Image (cartoon, rainbow, N blue to C red):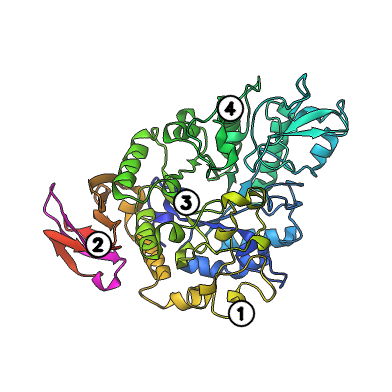
Amino acid sequence: MGVQNNQPNTLWWQSGVIYQIYPRSFQDNNGDGIGDLRGIITRLDYLQWLGIRAIWISPIYPSPMADFGYDIADYTNIHSMFGTMDDFDELVREIHARNMKLILDLVPNHTSDQHPWFLESKSSRNNPRRDWYIWRDARPDGGVPNNWLAAFGGSAWQWDETTQQYYYHAFLKEQPDLNWRNPAVRQAMLDTMRFWLEKGVDGFRVDVMWHMIKDEKLRDNPVNTAYQHHMATYDQLLPVYSTDQPEVHDIVREMRALLDRYTERMLIGEIYLPIHKLVTYYGKDNQGAHLPFNFQLLTLPWNARVIASAVSEYEGALPSQGWPNWVLSNHDQPRIASRVGAHQARVAATLLLTLRGTPTVYYGDEIGMRDVPIPFHEIQDPQGLNMPDKNLSRDPSRTPMQWNNSEQGGFTAGKPWLRLDRNFYQVNVQAQKDDAYSMLQLYRKLIRLREEYIALVAGNYMPVYADHQMMAYIRAAEGAPRLLIVLNFSHRPCYFKSLAEPLKGTILVSTSPELEGTTVEGTTSLSGDEAIVVRLDA
């Protein structure tokens, strides 16, 4: 069905939509209040109905959960909280049976301090795995080796009393960074990837890819002169020596080479960098990450001119054969509905699913879930606990999926690990599934449109117009119908008239469903918070 299998020159990760699942919050199957693998299995039919092509699951490995799974104690097993390896194997089978793909989160930059590798490394200075992590002597005055800061607050160096040295941790002290300059570390991580590839995993999303290797001389980071008090303490310095080192591209190339030995496997890189640096992670001759995550729609002001300019800059910066991608929300950032409002979130959905490249949908965005206020005494996220005065907890965007209006929203029979939004009685999958005006139906129609029109998958992106209110562009593929997308980023009416050619066509999808099937000609008017996708007449 659709373009995924029938269109030439597009692979599944180019033509399909990726859906991110935060496993603690998707579906609880055993009543303990925490989502699990069997819960995900029970919801696969829903994802297939929605039109999802690939599922990305945040970490499910054994972990002390200091950072909710991003502190891994065993790279080749499943945390009992989420199920068993048999459950995982069944999940792979069920996903593939629905012609969908599975992408696993991989966290190669750091381990848990309870990982056997680190326990060995810290046991003595002479241990064979000592150099698997980054250990340094104190300065002559007893101070830390350099001024590097941890992303979750404080110094990035932790003193070890037993061996009388500091170890480096870019995040929590319970997450010591691996030394990727050690060939044995590289081999161990490639072996980890091979383990999951042999189990049928279709790709990896690599956590903090740009952190993986550090300046060999461990030079001090320079002061960030643009720092403001409301920012995280980590932003006091510019991480020019602790991240994005030239040698990281050698590592990414090795990962890609491993995946290329398998059929149609793919590599996503989490990289928070400016566009001109981000695109270097595609690698020379595109032998790097297939999709270095592009977070512009997460970080830029919600302004038509700004977004239009950013899209054009990104398109212009992409290397030859580099495939674009777009994200509106994820587990580390506020949800799109909370950033731009419920009405503009519909415009954002239209943008996400009609731009050139691969879209990633964060669970719950398709029903308009918003950030949930979590009382201070219920905060679970270490980033929020370590910097409570800065309101940086990521818990509000990680709350349980809202399936129906039953108790706890159909997520669990027990007490959920985080509270649900009070609006789950109205905002849920069941209520929206048969509502033609719902956010869920808008997502489903847009995803289906991608299956029906090759221009949305393999077509060019051609900017048409942008001003202080709206943005318009055309998606066009040779020999196929052209689509015009017009987005009103404001709450006020706006008017669009094409200067390049006469405007004439039929509205295929709109944030106002009553417009669908109507024709537009000459000048078209949009209400506030409205978006349309128009099939242009030949």
- Asked whether 377 or 414 is in front, the reply is 377
Circle 1 SS class: helix
- Where is residue 241? Give x, y as percent: 59, 26
In the figure, residue 318 lies in which quadrant?
A: top left
The answer to whether 229 appears left or right of 336 in the picture is right
- Asked whether 252 or 480 is in front, the reply is 252
Q: Which residue is mark 1?
A: 407
Q: Image point 57% across, 31% down: which residue?
A: 239
Mark 3 or 2: in front is 2
Q: What's the distance in space between the residues labelled 3 and 2, CA to CA?
A: 39 Å
Of the numbered discs in the image, which one, if any, rests on residue 154? none
Crowd band around label 2 with a 10 angstrom C-alpha radius: few (<14), some (14–19), many (20+): few
The C terminus sits in image quarter: bottom left
The tag earlier along the polypeptide, 3 or 2, is: 3
Examine the rendering and report whether any part of residue 461 can be seen: yes
Type of residue at label 1?
A: Glu
What's drawn in magenta, residue-wise? 492-515
Q: Image point 82% across, 33% down: which residue?
A: 160
Type of residue at label 3?
A: Trp
- Where is residue 416? Give x, y as percent: 66, 69
The tag earlier along the polypeptide, 2 or 1, is: 1
Crowd band around label 4 with a 10 angstrom C-alpha radius: few (<14), some (14–19), many (20+): few
Q: Image point 53% across, 59% down: which residue?
A: 100
Q: Which residue is mark 3?
A: 12
Type of residue at label 4?
A: Asp
Is 132 part of what is drawn in magenta? no
Q: Which residue is mark 2?
A: 492
The N terminus sits in image quarter: bottom left
The tag earlier along the polypeptide, 4 or 3, is: 3
The tag earlier along the polypeptide, 4 or 2, is: 4
Q: What's the distance in space between the residues labelled 1 and 4, CA to CA?
A: 50 Å
Q: Which residue is mark 4?
A: 250
